[in-house]
Image (cartoon, grey):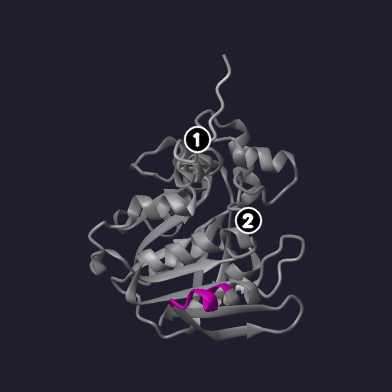
Amino acid sequence: MFKFNFSSEDTDPDDEEKANREKLWKKCKEILYEAGNKCVEDIFQHVHTDSIFSNGSEIKYFRRTEILKMLNNAENLNENSVLEAERNHSDLVPAVYEGGLKIWECTYDLFSYINECDNDFTNKKVLDLGCGAGIIGITLYLKGANCWFQDYNSDVIQFLTIPNVLLNSRDRIQNCKFYSGDWDFFVDTVDEPSGDEQNKFDYIFTSETIYNTESYPKLHKVFEKLLKKTGVIFLAAKSFYFGVGGGLFLFQDFIDKHKIFKYTSCWKCMEGVKREILKIQFL
């Protein structure tokens, strides 16, 4: 017997969209660190480090190539996405691996800007969105912030972000939280139903996260739902992402159309690949 379902009442489009999203994108989960974690201790013993400097500030980080070797030999991977991308010689595979092991160019710009600005981050609640190696969040953490780190891939958080935080300071690791997964799921997980402003972020920092125009609604949702009304977003990006489709002007246009945020440029580089840092706030 064949049955044909033509009635639109049988399927809710929102439910179908949610089901498709859950199949494609990684769900959000909190990655917990416990003292004595073998994975982290192995990284400290076997992986070399590099540093970046700006205005007297130094951030250390473990080398990407050596972390990849550890991932190849690891028995406790949460996912194979990073290695799958590496086998395909790609820094980006949408919905699979979003480039978290690489420190991208605009991260250095944002790192320098933070160290040159006069903002007081002491005891501020800060989100490093799309954190990767965690350079930005670590910088703020060392300046006294309570920092949350988010990246798409859980193995990036486990094998790179958390070790990098510990490499720079173990003193206040309890003031940090770590999450992986898609931005939609991240908002669903951490957004307070009560809408309590005290539980939202004073600052959101994000770098190189607007290369894909399809992600703009998700990114805008994170800003809208998780930022305090008096909060500030700093977004560092290239003017154009050739071969990918996104760029600063397209994201500015997206913001303008939604009429929730305003933005100003607080830093620009007009030589070579054009880059900029936007300061974004509620209207």
**Given the current orientation, which residue lies at the most extreme top position?**
1
- Magenta span of residues: 254-260
Indicate left or right for 120 with 54 as reference: left
Q: Main secondary structure of the magenta part?
A: helix
Taking the spot 49% from the left edge, 39% from the top edge, the residue there is 19
Taking the spot 32% from the left edge, 76% from the top edge, the residue there is 229
Q: Are marks 2 and 1 in contact (CB under 8 Å)?
A: no
Looking at the rendered structure, the kind of residue marked 1 is Asn
Q: Which mark is residue 102?
A: 2
Q: Within the magenta stretch, is there residue 189?
A: no
Position in image of residue 41 (x %, y %): 45, 41
Indicate left or right for 191 with 79 as reference: left
Taking the spot 22% from the left edge, 60% from the top edge, the residue there is 194
Q: Within the magenta stretch, is there residue 258?
A: yes
Location of the C terminus by quadrant is bottom left
Q: Is residue 103 visible?
A: no
Residue in the foreground of this view, choosing between 33 and 281: 281
Read off the residue under disc 1. Answer: 78
Position in image of residue 63 (x %, y %): 61, 52
